[in-house]
Image (spheres, rainbow, N blue to C red):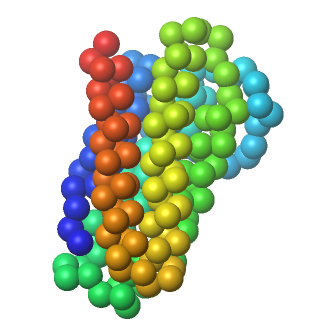
Amino acid sequence: MRMKVATIACAVIACSGAILGCGGPGSISTGTIEVGTRVQPEQYLADTRGAADAVARFAAIVNALPKPLTQAALVGAAAEMVDPLTRAQAAQTRLDAMRLEDQRLESQRVRVRVASAAVVQAMVAMRAAAAKGDMAAAKATAAQLQTSIAALRALTEPIASQ
């Protein structure tokens, strides 16, 4: 079940650093924020980078699954998927809740938030399939994950080139 998911996820990380035109390493806070909380651009960047890092880690786990896939390997990977999935979900919650004063950045946040939600949804489905050892569902979900990451990447590429 080799996929190019990890490569795509790495590109998302690179693009997320360019969303605001700066690129220092960000860290994700797993703390919650109230819906509508105004945040600084730096916090938005840190949360998007944190989400991208979590997606890249999750994708690396999926990409490392053996070919041909075995049920034992799939079930074994389920535990590894928990941490990056939890971090991606926390970042998604923050991206959903936050607001930015700058309307250009707020528009970007809305677009990234929607595409990121599809990635997190695919990650949840992949983790569930892995935990059950459902190889057919895992293969289908891997394709969904790859598609959703590619859609997020396509969304961030024009932002990165600005």
Residue 126 appearing in the image:
yes
The residue at the point 44 percent across, 20 percent down is 20
Does residue 29 appear left or right of residue 136 in this picture? right
Residue 114 placement (x, y as % from top left) = 52, 34
Expressed as whole percent of the image width and height from the top left, the position of residue 62 reads 34, 67
- Kindly give the residue lying farthest to the bottom in the view shown: 72
The number of callouts visible is: 0
Q: Name the residue located 27 percent from the left edge and 47 percent from the top edge.
A: 8
Q: Residue furthest right?
A: 34
Place of residue 59 in the rendered image (x, y in percent of width and height, measured from the top left): 35, 59
Q: State the image quarter where residue 145 is shown.
A: bottom left
Q: Work out whether 133 lies above or below 41.
A: below
Vertical order, 21 against 64 (above or below)? above
- Between 96 and 79, the one lying in front of the other is 96
Residue under the image location 59 percent in, 43 percent down: 92
Q: Is residue 91 left or right of residue 84?
A: right
